[in-house]
Image (tube, rainbow, N blue to C red):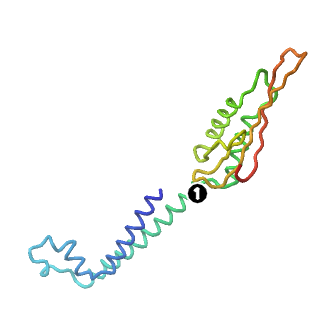
Amino acid sequence: MTALIVFVVIAAVVMFVLGCMDQRKVYLRTRGWQYRNPEALEPSDAALTMSRVGYFFGTVVLLVLALVLKSADRSMDYSTSQVHSVAYAAARSVESGRSSGLGSAIDASSSVYSAVNDEGNGKVKIRDAGGDKYELTNRKGRNPVCLTVTVDNALGLGNGEPWSHTVTTSVTDGPC
């Protein structure tokens, strides 16, 4: 999107420069070459003035388009509260009560990545911050939120199921 915005701004600058140039020279270079005797078919002063006005109007239109594109690009980025909401939703989907069997940090990690991708619709990046922490940001790497996922394994002697595990999560603002 940034490349498109830069292209539109460059086009606006070119239109502005063309509007500032002598319009007779612009005519001779852009359309006059098509005629055997271009001076005999030269446009009127009013036509040249309208050409200049058209270039300046085109400049304004392109600059407005660049601002609209920049605004649209900015609205596609999640704010801190939106990244926070994605982190909470992912935490709820990963968290579990007591489950039988041994829990694994690898299983929890894959669950975290898939939950963030599901909840964030591709607009939230996730990276492993080491240990049991994951840093979530918007797609431009801004507005960090820290998601902590802990897997607790417990040995229950005397129960029907000797091993069980619990997955707990917490979410904090800021980088991990």
Residue 112: x, y in percent? Answer: 67, 37
Q: Horizontal placement of 136 versus 157: left or right?
A: left
- Horizontal side of 80 relative to 47 (left or right) equals right
In this view, the residue in front, 41 or 147, is 147
Q: How many numbered circles are shown? A: 1
Which residue is rendered at x = 23% and y = 81% of the image?
A: 24
Residue 152 sits in quarter = top right
| Residue 142 position (above or below residue 11) | above
Q: Is residue 151 left or right of residue 21?
A: right
- The outermost residue toward the bottom is 45
Report x, y in % for residue 127: 63, 43
Above or below residue 159? Residue 74 is below
Q: Residues within 10 Å of mark 1 (few under 14, many from 20)?
A: few
Residue at (33, 78) in percent of width and height? 19
- Image location (x, y in percent) of residue 4: 43, 59
Dividing the picture into quadrants, the one containing residue 113 is top right
Q: Report the front residue among 45 and 72.
A: 72
Instruction: State the residue in front, 59 or 88.
Output: 88
Determine the residue located farthest toward the right in the rendered image.
158
Residue furthest to the left: 36
Residue drawn where x is 71% and y is 49% of the image? 176
Q: Please, is residue 110 above or below residue 175 in the view? A: above
Say which residue appears at 12% left-offset and 73% top-offset: 35
How far from the left and from the top, in percent, is residue 77? 59, 54
The image quadrant that residue 133 belongs to is: top right
The kind of residue tagged 1 is Ser
Q: Secondary structure at mark 1?
A: helix
Residue at mark 1? 75
Is 67 displayed left or right of 20 in the figure? right
